[in-house]
């Protein structure tokens, strides 16, 4: 099998409920649908979310690097030669979600060619994952209402709370109110997206000891190394590296230099291949792993559950799989469903990302 065409389609879908956090805000989805066509009539597909505030990529840069640089390594290649293709992609630094998307689309082809779901090809550990919902910035009452509605409507029992606002007391009050509203059995953790200093983050931890928080993601800027190390060493809960560990090398460096004590894995940026290496690294060191959300569409979330449910170590905690519900629509032909707080891994051959062509025609912006 050979790749005969590389298709990059930019599209735009508004958010039903915009999502704001310390490093940015999303009020519409502007993603790239990547499709790798082959001489055997199979098409590998992936959703690519440019996030300038996290990786420096834009809609235009994702398309430019794939069409102008990466296509050369893909055209004429056998999708089963993934390691060879990746060796060529690695010659270009950065461009994290463009590379992640290519890996997902290659695996989609491999799964379709084998007639097996990629979830099973990777490991097939469990059939579904429990869901964490990510709560963006809003007044306390609105955040509490959103969490209670997710518990009632979707059976979700885990929330990642976006924090990092000033003064710190605003978020202390939010977390306290949320714990009181949801009761003791719901899992709560924080993500400050580098919004605070290490000192402010330590104040937050000290002021919320009663709230039984489980993790604290990117409390401050990991590049301020000594502040971060002090925080990691003194924190009673794991400090999770997300944007400070966007690839395997960064994950290893952050853990070994004391910049983090747990890892977020996002298939949007490390695909399945590099995500697997990060997972093995974390497992060997006894580090907790969270399956993260890159403000993913249904197509992106399908990739997350495909990987997360494939391994024991990535399915220990609820995965961030629900923020597609903030979007007004999606390209997925079959809607992704949350049932009793869980999302099932696809069973069809490949990744299971089937695109609705009418919707693509409607939302494409090229
Ligand atoms: C998250 O976990 O940080 C917001 C920015 C980004 O890169 O991902 C989202 C969610
Ligand atoms: Mg994060």
Image: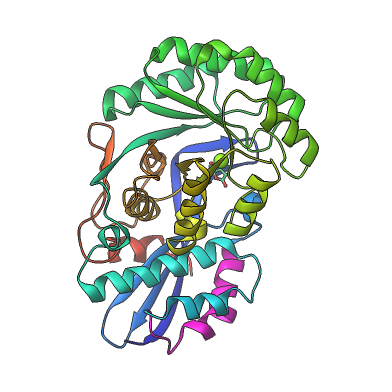
User: At which x and y percent is residue 197?
Assistant: 75, 30
Q: Residue at x 44, y 28 (%)?
A: 159
128 left or right of 92 in image: left
Q: Residue at x 51, y 54 (%)?
A: 278
On screen, residue 17 above or below 51: above
Quick check: which quadrant has ligand 2? top right
**46 vs 284, nearest the viewer:** 284
Does the magenta portion include 67? yes
**209 vs 311, nearest the viewer:** 311
Answer yes or no: is residue 294 visible.
Answer: no
Helix, strand or loop for the magenta stretch, by majority: helix
The N terminus is located in which quarter? bottom left
User: At which x and y percent is residue 137?
Assistant: 56, 29
Q: In which image quadrant can residue 340 be found?
A: top left
Q: Which residues are magenta?
A: 59-79
**225 vs 243, nearest the viewer:** 225
Q: Residue at x 39, y 15 (%)?
A: 182
Answer yes or no: is residue 274 visible.
Answer: yes
User: At which x and y percent is residue 59?
Assistant: 57, 63
Q: Residue at x 38, y 36 (%)?
A: 318
Does the magenta portion include 86? no
């Amino acid at each position: 099998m050979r790749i005969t065409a590389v298709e990059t389609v930019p599209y735009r879908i508004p958010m039903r409920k915009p999502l704001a956090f310390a490093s940015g805000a999303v009020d519409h989805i502007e993603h790239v649908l990547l499709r790798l066509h082959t001489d055997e009539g199979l098409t590998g597909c992936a959703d690519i979310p440019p996030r300038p505030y996290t990786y420096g990529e834009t809609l235009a840069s994702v398309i430019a690097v794939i069409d102008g640089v990466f296509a050369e390594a893909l055209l004429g290649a056998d999708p089963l030669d993934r390691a060879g293709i990746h060796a060529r992609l690695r010659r270009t630094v950065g461009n994290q979600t463009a590379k992640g998307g290519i890996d997902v689309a290659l695996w989609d082809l491999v799964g379709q060619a084998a007639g097996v779901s990629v979830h099973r090809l990777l490991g097939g550990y469990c059939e579904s994952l429990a869901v964490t919902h990510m709560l963006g910035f809003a007044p306390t009452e609105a955040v509490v209402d959103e969490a209670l509605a997710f518990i009632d409507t979707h059976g979700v029992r885990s929330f990642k709370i976006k924090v990092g606002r000033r003064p710190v007391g605003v978020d202390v009050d939010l977390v306290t109110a949320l714990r009181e509203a949801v009761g003791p059995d719901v899992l709560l953790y924080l993500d400050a997206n580098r919004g605070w200093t290490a000192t402010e983050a330590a104040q937050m931890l000290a002021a919320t000891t009663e709230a039984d928080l489980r993790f604290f993601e990117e409390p401050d800027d990991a590049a301020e190394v000594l502040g971060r190390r002090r925080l990691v060493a003194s924190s009673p809960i794991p400090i999770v590296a997300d944007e400070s560990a966007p690839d395997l090398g960064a994950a290893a460096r952050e853990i070994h230099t004391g910049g983090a004590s747990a890892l977020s894995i996002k298939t949007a940026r490390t695909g399945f291949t590099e995500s697997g290496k990060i997972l093995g690294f974390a497992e060997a060191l006894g580090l907790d792993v969270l399956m993260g959300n890159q403000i993913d569409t249904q197509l992106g979330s399908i990739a997350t559950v495909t990987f997360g449910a494939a391994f024991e170590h990535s399915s220990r905690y609820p995965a961030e799989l629900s923020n597609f519900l903030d979007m007004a629509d999606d390209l997925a032909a079959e809607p992704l469903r949350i049932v009793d707080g869980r999302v099932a891994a696809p069973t069809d051959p490949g990744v299971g990302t089937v695109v609705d062509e009418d919707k693509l025609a409607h939302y494409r912006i090229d």
